[in-house]
Amino acid sequence: MKKTSKATSFIAGCAIIAGIASCTSPQGNNTTTNKHTVEDSLQRYVSERLGIYEKVKLTSNLNELSANERKILPLLIQAAQIMDDLFWKQAYPQRDSLLATIKDEKTRAFLDINYGPWDRLNGDKPFVSGIGAKPDASSFYPSGMTKAELEKSDVKDKLGQYSVIKRDSTGKLMSVPYHILYASELQKASNLLKEAAVLAEDEGFKKYLNLRADALMSDDFTASDYAWLDMKNNGLDIIIGPIENYEDKLFNARASYESYVLIKDKVWSKRLAKYVAMLPQLQLGLPVDTKYKQEKPGTDSELNAYDVVYYAGDCNAGSKTIAVNLPNDEVIQQKKGTRRSQLKNAMKAKFDKILMPIAKELIDKGQQQYINFDAFFANVMFHEVAHGLGIKKTITGKGFVKEALQEQYSWLEEGKADVLGLYMVTGLLKKAELEGDIKQFYTTYMAGILRSVRFGAASAHGKANMQCFNFFKENGAFIRNDNGTYKVDFAKFETAMNKLSNLIITLQGNGDKKAVEKTQKEKAIITPELQSDLDKLTKKGIPVDIVFEQGVDVLGVK
């Protein structure tokens, strides 16, 4: 996100003060006075930071739902709320004790948005007095455990997605599966999904709900993932369970709980269906050496548009996801593909409330005419589709790319999807398979970069967009006008897109973690010049992201 130079220096100072717990000035101010000063400063910071989120109601047209589907919705939302509680336990287990000490309502609200006392859109800066830096291990690993200690241990499930590493009574490292650690909560969620399955009229949806309910209790999600991909005619959907690895910043291995409750937009979904079949042809045309594009992407998958009516857990923390590409299992992706879910109502809210105001401030006046929602929708959609392109296994014998790159994987994969999504748009326009002017897609993409870099260095998507911005700048894909606005050079934009595609796929295929770390340090940064331009957005009060009013009351269902 936008780390304004003022906010950055201020909060860094706060972090130092919080870590010390008390300090005295040369005049000898007492500890109590200093503590109040720190707390007052942090409350001012929180008050300012709350303003970066625009409140949005999550609603949808329920008129097309059957009577049974209306009964299912509250059950799905209840199950999602359990995922929300589980993510709190993963992100900040001391939630209740911390909330008990905080009287300031704005700080409590900011804690809810961030699922803990660290500002996710400002480099995970602490905003509660006495709180230090956010640990990379989160609650997935014991405090003080080093990466080397786990790697040298005899724990069988060292990098398991669905377990927590703890110490036994002797201090030895051990693994505890999620379904044992969170048995009570998962049983309740499982029961709710089973109850929903009884009411489900679509057989594919019924099968998925039952299998997913079982998977929550076993941590074996394979069968339910396949069943989820097999669904074709369902009107409702729920994505639920431990899914993404972003919260584990130590190994990028362990998954966090989250959920989306979805209502399918069948009209838009029908329009999107044709693009998945084009993946193999687009794979062959990737601007990279042949050895990096030998894999065949799966095509038996869905590309659908939805209204999302409930976010919970990881996907609701800090910046809000507006499109989903799942499952993450590389074997399933290669055998069957993925489902790309476009969250149309959330996407439109971000376009209207964030991207358009940014474009009016930072895009060249003569090119603002090219910004439109259809281009934004397509760029986001093909970002998700592009996760299926490229390379999943290294060509250097290091296994899957994800295993080789560990904590460096997520941000580079998001960067790959960004640039290959644009590559797909370009290719489909040339084949007349997509309508529109390339100027619309490239200019809207440029505005999208300026939106996403504001998510900051703690976000995989933020890092990815920083890399893209700096790479495109170095290759002349855009110029910065004297008034601080950006103008796209459309010919050089395409050339830079192909060069960056080549770089990222090659880094992934080689599985060279050190090279990726070097790239992140050099390219995934916000320069002072860009920061000064982003500061203009803050001064104008343009939000960085959205926060939801959601639930059964908002939807009008019980």
Image (cartoon, rainbow, N blue to C red):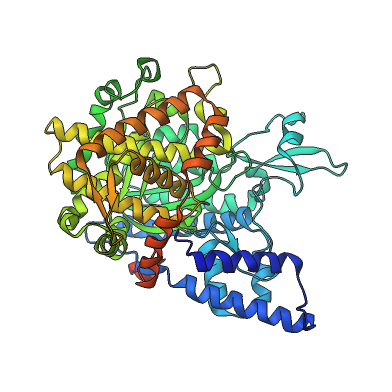
Q: Quadrant of the N terminus?
A: bottom left
Q: Is residue 291 left or right of residue 137?
A: left
x and y percentages locating residue 467 in the rendered image: 42, 43
Q: Residue at x 41, y 53 (%)?
A: 453
Q: Residue 412 versus residue 329: which sits nearer the camera?
A: 412
Q: Is residue 137 left or right of residue 545?
A: right
Residue 234's place in the image compared with 48, above or below, is above
Q: Residue 102 versus residue 21: which sits nearer the camera?
A: 21
Q: Residue at x 43, y 72 (%)?
A: 51
One can see residue 265 in this view: no
Residue 526's place in the image compared with 327, above or below, is below
Q: Quadrant of the C terminus?
A: bottom left
Count of number-bearing discs: 0
x and y percentages locating residue 64 in the rendered image: 22, 57
Q: Residue at x 54, y 49 (%)?
A: 257
Q: Is residue 530 left or right of residue 269?
A: right
x and y percentages locating residue 250 in the rendered image: 63, 42
One can see residue 408 in this view: yes
Residue 179, quarter of the rendered image: top right
x and y percentages locating residue 204 in the rendered image: 34, 38
- Residue lying at the far front of the rendered structure: 482
Q: Residue 490 versus residue 264: which sits nearer the camera?
A: 490
Q: Is residue 39 left or right of residue 495?
A: right
